[in-house]
């Protein structure tokens, strides 16, 4: 009896689970399907789901018009660079906040988060002027810096909550044994902190990859990442659905694959130490 | 050997004595079909001008405008050639942000440019941007639907006829809507159409003292006419339809008429994209017998920002991309129907073009009948048919566009929308110092 | 001695992050603050002059300002509601054993990787369009009149688009929290005859409190400055029905190129965001303490 109930339960959940999963995924699936249609078919009603003339012409067209690899490389460099640099700066800060908290630690954390509330559009012109004066317009290094600063508060906060989960007693013990700061980090902390750092890294790569304001407005030709690549396919005069879908698929694919493969680490980071 | 040859070739072409090393021009342009073709012809240019390389930044119109405006105003110097419209040219030229194009070469034949377009790009007789393609607006209609409804489209219809025909053709059960018009908020979207339409109803944006005129009877008639017509004979969702949405509707056979940019003609007659390609007729934009038609004038043009360090090379490129030879090159590679329209008289005199483009005559007449310097029935202090060439217009136009789009969606009344438009325009004009 | 030593160390370790953020705050924010008191339009160079609080007055008296403020809160609240409730539900579902659980999980998190502009374009044209969209096609299939989503329910539609992107984020956090729930405690409650509703209310929900707090805080920070989705779909309209504060600032900055006005708007937005943040922390911040 009981087994029968569990079995029925399992079937029900399978059906509901797949239904919801597919519904949520459907817009992405639809974009991918559309990228293999002709422009005429892409807007046709009734829409065709699988039985249409599959074509790769959109991908050829996209590749002949813009250098996908260059844009993708820029996205990789910018998202990895800004996240890496951010971690370098944030790890010591989060570390000391977690292990030598003072009365002001909480305030400092909140203040850091509040810098994130600066609406990008409101400060575009000041940043643009600064970039112009320091010759940073359309450079990867400029974008790496801006995105690093944009995400730094989140990185610090994530690491802080994560580090707080590491039992302080271990550190105390190590210090008693006369371990120096360097040894403390290398032998005790690093192994315990690596999972948290990895997940912080992943989340911030995603945030940086999808950033589409600064990356679009501070670049022209050389440093333009995938957000600019998309902008060259959206809303021209004329039909553009299939081509935009192809470009979107290309822009999403790398990060989606990365996210899927690393979802375990990602999940752990997303909890911000909210889970023990 | 090679570098010397390059230098010689470049030097000779630029007609300058200085030796020029290989230069890279960064060109900002819109992602419309004609510009994409230009980008694909890069090699034809570099073969002729080996000293110059081209780097393209191709973007959607709104993103591009926001990027190039920020760059030129802050003198960021990221671009050597910018694609801008008839709205920007007079404003930017006045600020000395653009280079006067006097290095286009002797064989450029500047007098071949269509006068209406050339005037819009010149200040004090100096050309500040070279037209890449020009457009006006006109009526595109379905000959088959008109025939089965027993109607005949005159070459120069009135608004009354258009409204009447639209209501007759509408067959909502079969998803056929009499007329598709822009409704999506934006100064270049619904306001382009409505400003041009308002001109033919005798309305205007400002009087000679820069007082906003939305409280006038003419504006009320215009907006009421538009909202009523769209409610009776327009497609659902009209308040979020722009050029592309209407194009898709027309191409899939859902509109009886569509009043929009003349460039659309080549899309709707292209059998590869359009289900109604062989059933489309053209007519001039409607009027109300007041002497002005509801058609606009726009030209995507190439200009050199004053901050560019490669002004000579940039002008060499512009001369190439807007020349007669370029038109012939496109014709040779892609056929005459795909040539960028609306810039040169010689194109419209070309029998081959007339044959390939059934819409050529109507396009030319539409462009010639638009007058940016005297757009309205009553005198106005500004230049521009479907826009007002002042820096504040983008913001004002978009905010007013939102009000009109709300009126179309039915969330506010026509009177309320006009009242809001009047208030917000007055506010902005006060801030700009035009009125007290 | 040791503590002094550690404290100095701590200062040294924190200083790069604090200094960089300080510079990031002081320079752009300082410039923004400075510009906010200037009459400064990029398109009219040479007219800069000090105007005191003129820009603030102009921004705050904008006829769209109150609507924008209200819409901002509505959008943040709406997305939070959908993602928190929906995320909890989804997490509870995925936590159950069923066939293909791993794949469903991948499907559910996928929207998080889609750029906001792309998702807005896709939703607007391929789904919500009243003539060519899939929803319209489905409505026709049931013999119904298609809904013109972005004209009739603009803010609701945008809320849904944004929520679609953030739902995976909420689901993942809540799911991980669920999986760390002490099963024995749950079983003991079941033995005592507690129903599944009361188990959820008295055992699961308290356990999720901290995860939910994190979801709400992080999402709020990002949602306050949503504007790409609005720009792509409705341009803030019809009327001001979908204009939020970010969009209002955008109009000042990149349509008017009114740097003074946009800067004042930016400062106002920061102040508002901080009010919201303080309010939030008062309300739920204690969940973060351990």
Image (tube, rainbow, N blue to C red):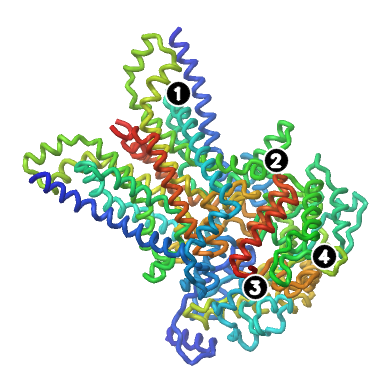
Q: Tell me residue B62's x, y (percent).
A: 58, 61
Residue A57 visible (yes or no): no
Q: Quadrant of residue B371?
A: bottom right
Around disc 3, counting alpha carbons within 10 Å, would you say few (fewer than 14), some (14 to 19), or many (20 or more)?
Answer: many
Mark 3 belongs to which subunit? B
* Callout count: 4
Q: Which residue is mark 3?
A: B132
Q: Which residue is mark 4?
A: B284
Element under label 4? strand
Mark 2 belongs to which subunit? A
Would you say C44 lies left or right of B211 here? left
Q: How many angstroms separate mark 4 from mark 1 (CA)?
A: 64 Å
Marks 2 and 4: CB-CB under 8 Å? no
Mark 4 belongs to which subunit? B
Between B46 and A268, the one nearer to me in the picture: A268
Q: Does mark 1 fall on the same chain as mark 2? A: no
């Amino acid at each position: 009896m009981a087994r029968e109930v569990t079995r029925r339960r399992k079937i029900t959940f399978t059906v509901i689970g797949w239904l919801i999963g597919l519904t949520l995924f459907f817009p992405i699936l639809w974009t991918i399907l559309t990228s293999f249609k002709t422009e005429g078919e892409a807007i046709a009603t009734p829409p065709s789901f699988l039985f249409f003339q599959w074509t790769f012409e959109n991908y050829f067209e996209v590749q002949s018009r813009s250098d996908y690899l260059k844009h993708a490389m820029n996205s990789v460099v910018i998202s990895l660079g800004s996240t890496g640099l951010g971690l370098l700066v944030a790890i010591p800060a989060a570390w000391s906040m977690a292990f030598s908290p003072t009365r002001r630690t909480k305030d400092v954390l909140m203040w850091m988060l509040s810098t994130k509330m600066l609406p990008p559009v409101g400060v575009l012109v000041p940043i643009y002027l600064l970039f112009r004066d320091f010759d940073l317009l359309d450079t990867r290094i400029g974008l790496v810096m801006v995105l690093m600063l944009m995400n730094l508060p989140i990185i610090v906060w994530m690491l802080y909550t994560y580090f707080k989960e590491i039992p302080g007693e271990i550190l105390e013990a190590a210090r008693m044994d006369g371990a120096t700061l360097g040894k403390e980090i290398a032998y005790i902390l690093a192994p315990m902190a690596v999972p948290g750092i990895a997940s912080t890294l992943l989340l911030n790569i995603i945030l940086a990859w999808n950033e589409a304001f600064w990356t679009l407005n501070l670049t022209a030709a050389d440093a333009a990442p995938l957000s600019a690549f998309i902008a060259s396919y959206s809303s021209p005069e004329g039909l553009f659905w299939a081509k935009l879908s192809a470009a979107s698929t290309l822009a999403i694919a790398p990060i989606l694959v990365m996210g899927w493969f690393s979802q375990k680490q990602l999940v752990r980071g997303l909890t911000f130490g909210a889970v023990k | 050997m090679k570098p010397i040859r390059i230098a010689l070739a470049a030097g000779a072409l630029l007609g300058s004595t200085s030796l020029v090393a290989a230069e890279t021009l960064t060109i900002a342009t819109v992602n419309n079909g004609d510009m994409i073709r230009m980008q694909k012809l890069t090699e034809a240019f570099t073969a002729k001008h080996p000293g110059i390389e081209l780097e393209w930044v191709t973007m959607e119109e709104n993103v591009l405008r926001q990027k190039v405006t920020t760059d030129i105003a802050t003198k960021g110097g990221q671009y050597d050639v910018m694609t801008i419209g008839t709205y920007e040219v007079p404003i930017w030229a006045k600020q000395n942000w653009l280079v006067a194009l006097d290095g286009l070469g002797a064989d450029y034949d500047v007098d071949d440019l269509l006068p209406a377009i050339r005037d819009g790009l010149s200040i004090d007789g100096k050309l500040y941007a070279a037209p890449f393609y020009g457009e006006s607006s006109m009526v595109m209609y379905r000959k088959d639907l008109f025939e089965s409804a027993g109607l005949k489209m005159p070459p120069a219809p009135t608004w009354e006829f258009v409204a009447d025909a639209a209501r007759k053709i509408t067959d909502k059960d079969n998803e056929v809507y009499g007329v598709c018009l822009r409704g999506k908020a934006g100064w270049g979207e619904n306001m382009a159409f409505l400003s041009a339409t308002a001109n033919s109803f005798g309305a205007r944006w400002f009087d000679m003292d820069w007082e906003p005129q939305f409280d006038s009877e003419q504006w009320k008639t215009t907006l009421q006419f538009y909202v009523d017509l769209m409610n009776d004979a327009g497609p659902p969702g009209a308040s979020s339809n722009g050029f592309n949405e209407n194009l898709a509707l027309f191409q899939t056979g859902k509109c009886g008429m569509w009043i929009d940019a003349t460039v659309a003609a080549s899309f709707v007659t292209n059998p590869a994209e359009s289900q109604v390609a062989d059933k489309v007729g053209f007519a001039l934009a409607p009027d109300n017998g007041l002497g002005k038609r509801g058609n606009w004038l726009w030209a995507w043009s190439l200009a050199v920002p004053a901050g560019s360090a490669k002004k000579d090379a940039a002008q060499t490129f512009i001369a190439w991309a807007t020349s007669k030879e370029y038109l012939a090159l496109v014709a040779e590679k892609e056929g005459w129907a795909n040539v960028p329209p609306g810039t040169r008289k010689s194109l419209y005199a070309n029998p081959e073009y007339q044959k390939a483009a059934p819409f050529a005559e109507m396009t030319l007449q539409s462009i010639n009948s638009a007058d940016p310097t005297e757009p309205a029935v009553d005198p106005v202090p500004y230049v521009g048919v479907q826009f007002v060439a002042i820096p504040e217009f983008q913001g004002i136009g978009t905010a007013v566009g939102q009000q009109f789009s709300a009126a179309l969606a039915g969330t506010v009344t026509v009177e309320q929308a006009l009242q809001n438009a009047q208030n917000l325009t007055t506010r902005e004009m006060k801030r700009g110092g035009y009125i007290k | 001695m040791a503590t002094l030593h550690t404290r100095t160390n701590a200062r040294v370790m924190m200083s790069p992050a604090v200094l960089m953020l300080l510079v990031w705050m002081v320079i752009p924010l300082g410039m923004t603050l400075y510009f906010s008191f200037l009459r400064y339009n990029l398109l009219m160079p040479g007219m800069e002059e000090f105007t005191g609080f003129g820009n603030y007055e102009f921004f705050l008296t904008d006829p769209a300002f109150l609507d924008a403020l209200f819409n901002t809160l509505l959008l943040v609240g709406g997305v939070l509601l959908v993602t928190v409730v929906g995320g909890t539900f989804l997490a509870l579902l995925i936590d159950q054993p069923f066939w293909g659980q791993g794949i469903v999980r991948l499907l559910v998190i996928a929207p998080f990787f889609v750029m906001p502009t792309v998702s807005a374009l896709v939703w607007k044209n391929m789904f919500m369009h009243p003539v060519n969209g899939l929803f319209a096609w489905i409505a026709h299939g049931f013999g119904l009149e298609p809904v013109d989503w972005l004209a009739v329910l603009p803010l609701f539609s945008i809320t849904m688009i944004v929520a679609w992107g953030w739902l995976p984020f909420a689901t993942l956090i809540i799911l991980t929290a669920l999986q760390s729930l002490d099963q024995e405690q749950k079983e003991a409650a079941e033995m005592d005859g507690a129903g599944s509703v009361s188990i959820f209310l008295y055992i699961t929900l308290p356990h999720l409190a901290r995860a939910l707090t994190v979801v709400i805080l992080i999402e709020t920070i990002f949602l306050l400055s949503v504007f790409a989705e609005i720009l792509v779909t409705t341009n803030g309209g019809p009327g001001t029905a979908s204009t939020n504060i970010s969009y209002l600032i955008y109009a000042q900055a990149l349509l008017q190129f009114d740097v003074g006005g946009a800067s004042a708007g930016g400062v106002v937005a920061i102040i508002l965001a901080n009010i919201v943040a303080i309010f939030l922390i008062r309300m739920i911040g204690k969940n973060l303490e351990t």
